[in-house]
Amino acid sequence: MSDHNYTPKSKVGQWFNDRLPLLTLANHLTDYPTPKNLNYWWTFGGILTFCLITQIVTGLTLAMHYIAHADMAFESVEHIMRDVNYGWLIRYIHANGASMFFLAVYIHIFRSLFYGSYKSPREIIWILGIIIYLLMMAAAFMGYVLPWGQMSFWGATVITNLFSAIPLVGEGIVTWLWGGYSVDNPTLTRFFTLHYLIPFLILGLVVLHIWALHVPGNNNPVGIDIKKPSKDTVPFHPYIVIKDGFALLMFMIVFAFFVFYAPNILGHADNYIEANPMVTPAHIVPEWYLLPFYAILRSVPDKLLGVVAMLSAILILAVLPWLDTSKIRSAVFRPLYKQFYWILVADVLILGYVGAMPAEGLYLLIARVATAYYFLHFLVILPVLGFKEKTLPVPLSITEPVLGGSPNLAAARNKESKIE
Amino acid sequence: MKSLFKLFSIIIIIIASNSYSFAAEKVEYLKTDWSFKGLFGKFDRASLQRGYQVYTEVCASCHSMKYLSYRNLAERGGPEFSEAQAKAIAASFDVTDGPNSDGEMFTRPGKLSDKFVMPYDNVKAAQAANGGAYPPDMSVLVKARGGGVDYIYSLLQGYEEAPSKVSLDDGVYYNKYMYGNKIRMAAPLSDGLVEYGDGTNATVEQMSKDVTTFLMWSAEPHLEARHKMGFKAIVYLIILTILVYFSMKKIWSRVESEV
């Protein structure tokens, strides 16, 4: 970590900092040494922070106009869209913001998978991230219920019914979750309450996530430990701040395109039909970002085992640091892992695709193969690969590849020993 | 790079093979040139006004539009009737109000602030009058259908004689664009059904286009404002991005590293 013996220049600053070391914290954050070879895949942490804050701010505004009641929720959303000043803008930012949030989080997670950022000593950062991801899914699911459209209602019915798969107490739990014998007003009000709560839990976990990150420091594309302070790092401000800012602006252009020109393209048309417990939609599908897990759920013929498979698919990520036995972090130096990585990416995309299709015939078969492969990747391929794979030589410092220095290992070693 | 290419080819093959296998079942919707599509898309004011006429003279006898108020008809970005016109339109409807000081409900002419008067008192009444089928509320209908405007536009023109193998019950009609091809609404439009004030020839095609435009506006009353603001926002973001890019290059030039 950076130098903590910081003393503010002004007397007032010193007085304040002795009592509450906020200025030391600010100094730590600006000086935080960051590997200088981070590529743009590393900018998604900042983008995600932006997404979270955007969702909280727009969500607060929406909550001022939204009415969490089964008879009025749909109408109040239309009221926001029509009569509230710029209500359409705030709602479209919030609705598309959820998709943008997940887009960013998936890139963030897959970046971590590629560069082995979850490995020692960053396991806690990774596990906190998985908890954040779980909470995000809960928040997104409950948020989707709030407009009280057909997909809201039936999505809530399908997902809450999953708990009935638990032996003995399942039915009781579902009734307890619903606050009645079907998804109805009590369900809506509690979902609204939880939807309001969860983002703040996420915010707290994000603080821990960043705190835990600042102990070992960032991983980097080369995936080697760096000595700090050293030539391999740059202070967070201004170098990383401006780079993250640039990436964030690019991201915001994409975001703005969806908000202003295709605000409903990521949603389902049925959600503009008010919830009707008497009419079931032809296909009940979750939002796109939950589709891979929906595919896993449906690919198992048994309800309980399906739920177990779906949950395992997420929770398996939490033990990933111990499933991956390779000592090398970055896929750049793991030729075989790199191949399997891209197969996994394709596998998850295929799962997402079949998750949107009816669970029958060829789609079901594809879903089953893809589900099996998903678990195979984490439970068999990764542990075995760590022992079998012939990795490429790893440079001694990131300055070598950055400066385009000789990839020749002997030369690098030579240099290193001279310095020492 | 190579693996990325492989990945994309896999995805493209999957998507392509899928759309191919479904091509036979899917009907192509009729297309027309919607003025409100695209970066600068705006509503055709005259078409919106004609569309309102079709709605109120034809659709409104069964379909409600409960989220719209008469004042919306005079607002910017909509049909933009003059306020006097909108007031006259509102006043032509009877609105039940009350209770008054005697505790009685009473009927009065509509005002700008009133919501569109519904053709039926409730869903049950609507179903009873339509052979059990509920004519859906039209406020957000365009957004509530997968095909959007193209679907509605096609559906209105999609009535045909049923193929011989399809048997229809009483009060059910054949429409080639309807999901399942069976619809409980009789063909609502016929040539010359309404008489347009501006002399436009009221063909089924023209009326379909006008009323669909009107429905698009009713579902997205702020579409024009959205397009306008979107263009400004994106231009602003692009300029800022360029400026930040050069600042970044300058700052990073102090380090022997590429960004």
Image (tube, rainbow, N blue to C red):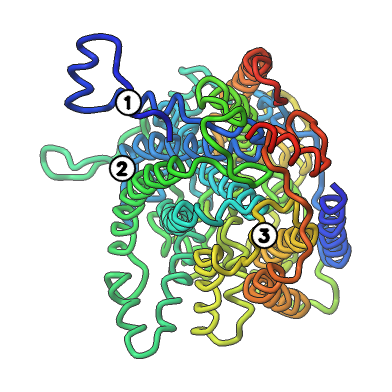
Dot 2 amino acid type:
Thr
Sequence-wise, which precedes: disc 3 or disc 2?
2
Left or right of residue A296, residue A32 in this image: left
Q: Quadrant of residue A41?
A: top right
Compared to residue A255, the image places residue A72 above or below, namely below
Name the subunit of mark 1.
A
Left or right of residue B219, residue A15 in this image: left
Left or right of residue B235, residue B65 in this image: left
* Residue A42, x across and y down, in percent: 61, 39
Q: CA distance from mark 2 to mark 1?
A: 75 Å
Name the subunit of mark 2.
B
Q: Nearer the viewer, residue A351 or A402?
A: A402
> Which residue lies at the image location 43% right of the left edge and 76% below the top edge?
A161
Q: Residue tagged by mark 1?
A: A5
Element assignment for label 2: strand
Tell me the crowding category of disc 1: few under 14, some 14 to 19, or many 20 or more residues within 10 angstroms, Cα based: few
Element assignment for label 1: loop
Name the subunit of mark 3.
B
Q: Quadrant of residue A363?
A: bottom right
Tell me the crowding category of disc 3: few under 14, some 14 to 19, or many 20 or more residues within 10 angstroms, Cα based: few
Q: CA distance from mark 3 to mark 1?
A: 82 Å
Q: Residue tagged by mark 2?
A: B96
Dot 1 amino acid type:
Asn
Q: Any mark on residue B252, and which? A: none
Q: Nearer the viewer, residue B194 or B231?
A: B231
Q: Residue tagged by mark 3?
A: B186
* Residue A69, x across and y down, in percent: 30, 54
Is the residue under label 1 in contact with that under label 2 (CB below 8 Å)?
Answer: no
Looking at this rendering, what residue extends furthest in the left direction? B102
